[in-house]
Image: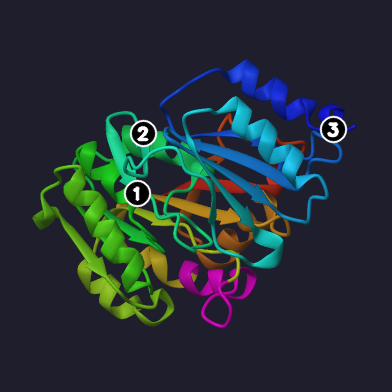
């Protein structure tokens, strides 16, 4: 019975074939595979990550399928429903844990963390930065491990200012710049609370590009629906005329139209250009329930 249950996963693995690029192999959360909505599988070259969002009664059968499909790779399991960190299921090699994007690499951390250091879903945002970073001074809010900063600088950005409350994440972000041979005089790492740093950030501007990619809910420190308007009210003052803004939200409870209304109410000088959603690896019944990245220009 379990063979039939997991056949969509087996078929997807066979369909995709081998690859070195970081990718989502199976996106059950997209709602297209009945009974498998709680399963996601990612590949980072030598590492496979299986993430469960609720308990799976046939977990051994699922992991056996993954193990047989990826004979040489390390396999990790994360039970997000139990708020457990990433755990090794089977180790095959001691190679470094990295995500590859074109000729850039990012270090990953599979030790107990809920997030391993690289988000696959914002691929279209990475492509936007590849085309729109050259010569720009960019502010990267909620920068986490600074992957978007690395991409911007590798594609000609003049300077990037990264801001995140987690100094540990920023430390990993700095390491990502180092391993990609980026001139550190072009980048800053500020361990600040964005909501308490508007004055400082305005003084560091004006910026030609601003990335806002906050967590949906970070306990008491950030709540998307309540705190996003606070940022939008202040961000225009940080921007040079004609600057672009990448305004991201990843919540099924906040639609593209909701974000547009929020911007229209709190940042009247911004002009909507386009919206992107999760990358092609993320098959979704309702794209708007996943990542939304709205591009605006400051008038």
**Residues at discs 1 and 2 in contact (Cβ within 8 Å):** yes
From this viewpoint, which residue is outermost toward the right? 1
Is residue 196 visible from the viewing direction of this image?
yes
Q: What secondary structure is found at the residue carrying circle 3?
A: helix
- Name the foreground residue: 147 vs 277: 147
Q: What residue would you read off at disc 3?
A: 5
Where, quadrant-wise, is the N terminus in this rendering?
top right
Residue 292 in the image: x percent, y percent?
59, 47
- Name the foreground residue: 66 vs 278: 66
Position above or below: 230 against 89: below
**Mark 3 Cα shell of 10 Å, populated few (<14), some (14-19), many (≥20):** some
Q: What secondary structure is found at the residue carrying circle 1?
A: helix
What distance separates the C-alpha of mark 3 from that of mark 2? Answer: 32 Å
The residue located at (81%, 34%) in the rendering is: 33
What distance separates the C-alpha of mark 1 from that of mark 2? Answer: 10 Å
Pointer 3 or 2: first along the chain = 3
Magenta includes 14? no
**Mark 2 Cα shell of 10 Å, populated few (<14), some (14-19), many (≥20):** some
Mark 3 vs mark 1, foreground winner is 3
Read off the magenta span.
218-232
Residue 5 in the image: x percent, y percent?
85, 32
Magenta includes 228? yes
Dominant secondary structure, magenta: helix
Q: What residue would you read off at disc 1?
A: 147
Position above or below: 277 against 53: above
Q: How many marks?
A: 3
Is residue 283 visible from the viewing direction of this image?
no
The quadrant in which residue 240 appears is bottom left
Q: What residue would you read off at disc 2?
A: 101
Left or right: residue 162 versus residue 213 is left
């Amino acid at each position: 019975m379990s063979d039939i249950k997991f056949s969509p996963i087996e078929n997807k693995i066979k369909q995709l074939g081998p690859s070195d690029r970081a990718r989502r192999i199976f996106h059950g959360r997209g709602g297209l595979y009945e009974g498998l909505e709680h399963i996601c599988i990612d590949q980072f070259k030598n590492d496979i990550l299986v993430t469960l969002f609720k308990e799976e009664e046939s977990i051994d059968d699922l992991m056996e399928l993954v193990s047989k499909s990826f004979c040489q790779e390390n396999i990790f399991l994360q039970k997000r429903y139990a708020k457990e960190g990433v755990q090794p299921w089977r180790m095959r090699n001691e190679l470094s844990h990295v995500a590859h994007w074109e000729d850039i690499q990012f270090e990953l951390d599979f030790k107990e963390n809920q997030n391993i250091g690289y988000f696959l879903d914002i691929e279209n945002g990475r492509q936007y930065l590849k085309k729109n970073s050259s010569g720009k001074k960019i502010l990267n809010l909620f920068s986490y491990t600074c992957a978007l900063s690395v991409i911007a600088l590798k594609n000609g950005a003049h300077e990037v200012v990264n801001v995140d409350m987690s100094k540990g994440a920023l430390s990993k972000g700095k390491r990502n710049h180092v391993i990609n041979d980026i001139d550190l005089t072009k980048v800053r790492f500020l361990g600040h609370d964005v909501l308490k740093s508007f004055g400082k950030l305005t003084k560091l501007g004006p910026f030609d590009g601003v990335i806002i990619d906050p967590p949906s809910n970070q306990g008491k420190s950030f709540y998307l629906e309540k705190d996003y308007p606070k940022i939008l009210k202040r961000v225009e003052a940080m921007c040079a005329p004609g600057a672009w803004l990448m305004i991201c939200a990843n919540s099924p409870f906040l639609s593209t139209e909701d974000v547009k209304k929020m911007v229209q109410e709190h940042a009247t000088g911004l002009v909507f250009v386009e919206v992107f959603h999760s990358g092609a690896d993320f098959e979704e019944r309702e794209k708007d329930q996943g990542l939304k990245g709205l591009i605006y220009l400051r008038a």
